[in-house]
Amino acid sequence: MISFEDATRAFGNRIAVDRLNLSVGKGELLALLGHNGAGKTTSLKMLVGLLKPSSGLVRVGPYLVSDNPREASRLIGYVPDQPFLYEKLSGREFLEFVAELYGLSSAEVRTSVEREAERFQLGPFLNRLTESYSHGMRQRTVFAAALIHQPEVLVVDEPMVGLDPQSIRLVKDLLREYANSGKSVLMSTHTLAIAEEICDRVAVMKSSKLVFCGPMTELREKIPETDGHLESLYLALTKD
Amino acid sequence: MATVDIAFEPEFLTHVERLPTHEREGQLFWKLRLRESRSQLKNLFTNSRMRTTLVISLSIFFWAGLFSLFYLGFSFVVSNVGPPGATYHAQTVQFVFTLFFMSLQVMLVFSAGIILYGGLYASNETTLLLTLPVRDSRLVFYRFQEALFFSSWGFFLLASPMMIAYGMVVNAPWYYYAYLPGLMISFAYIPCALGAMACLLLISRVPHLRRIIVGLIALVVVAIAYSSIWHTLDI
């Protein structure tokens, strides 16, 4: 459903992502791991159309993102690490705006907003201006907006930052259930325990390159001398 | 290489075919603006009454001051230089109008370009919109409208008292006033469009030199303005 084919992105002389080859299938949840500056966010930005690859291809479903950004983005729901909400709109108005941009009919907009409001427990503050929302409320609203059109692909950048335990549980369950329903989920995270708990495969980036991609069992076989937890495996894999 | 493999999943085409038309996208952005404006106004008149009252009062005071200044100035021209229709009157008014509108034109080019830059390339909202299925052209147009609005309010505040004062001094017919809004709106579009085009060109061709180029152009404009004023004093 998602594929990076030799995707490279350079900023001047600095290569942020170097010949990335990675794919995520239907019904799969993949965690993208790596130190700060390893190229995770740049990879996600190429996937959602915010950056064009300097070379190589990025596909979502049948679409090349660089050639058909609008069509590709219809299939994607994106939760960025620094989400934006219109401060002078209520959560409901924001969700309606996003749903209408995805081409949902008026009836679909109503049912989608209610569905996501219930899923993310937005009801009590849905009609309040988003400027009054806490970080957790904002994050839940952004998740609701990303899922409003039930995308084939969910792309999430650092989903757990600043969330309370209840919201973390909600997001974890959601990501797993979404993948189980046959959709593709790509998540970039530093929270290794959660990646270990819910992901089908992990991909590890180091210094702009992909150094591992596979299930946890494969990673344990690759580095047998650790205690088998993702944290130890990750640290061993990314050690200089 | 084919960019779209339609046989891959035909249901994807159904999703894509349902995306809003160009016109519908435009309507959605207008709806967004109206909702934001309504909320902003409600906030201004409920939570920030003091600030709102102050801004409105000072704007009225500023407008009235400018109007008085222009009224007295044009009255002086009529009584000391010549009545409307006289050669010296026409030359003087032409000079004042040219200088005034030329200066505002330069101001509008810069302000529209800078506001568009801030809206298109350094904005979290644009980042959000780029991840949604919005046409690039619609996004630029949406941002251009915003740049036009925010850069030209100063122009309307400055130009309207001058134009109305002149009309009153020379006893202009009613249609002079009727044409004024249209004239000013269409005037604002030209420099704003120039500023927007310059901004888009700079970012697409020489993004890393944008600050240097804008600084150099500003220096040239200041030099030309200084030279023009110097020669005016010579006359």
Image (cartoon, helix red, strand yellow):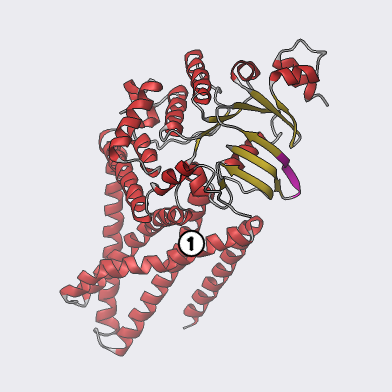
At horizontal 38% and vertical 20% (from top left) the residue drawn is: A121
| Numbered range of the magenta stretch | A13-20
Q: Is residue B215 visible?
A: no
Q: Quick one: quadrant of the N terminus of chain B?
A: bottom right
Q: Main secondary structure of the magenta part?
A: strand
Q: Is residue A168 visible?
A: yes
Residue A142 position in % (x across, y down): 45, 31
Secondary structure of residue under mark 1:
helix
Magenta stretch holds residue B142: no
**Residue projecting furthest to the bottom:** B87
The image quarter containing residue A235 is top right
At horizontal 80% and vertical 18% (from top left) the residue drawn is: A223
At horizontal 35% and vertical 53% (from top left) the residue drawn is: B26
Question: Would you place residue B24 above or below residue A1 in this image?
Answer: below
Front in this rendered view, residue A109 or B131: A109
**Residue projecting furthest to the left:** B174
Which chain is mark 1 on?
Answer: B
Question: Would you place residue B73 above or below residue B5 in this image?
Answer: below
Residue B165 position in % (x across, y down): 25, 69
Magenta stretch holds residue A14: yes
The residue that disc 1 covers is B196
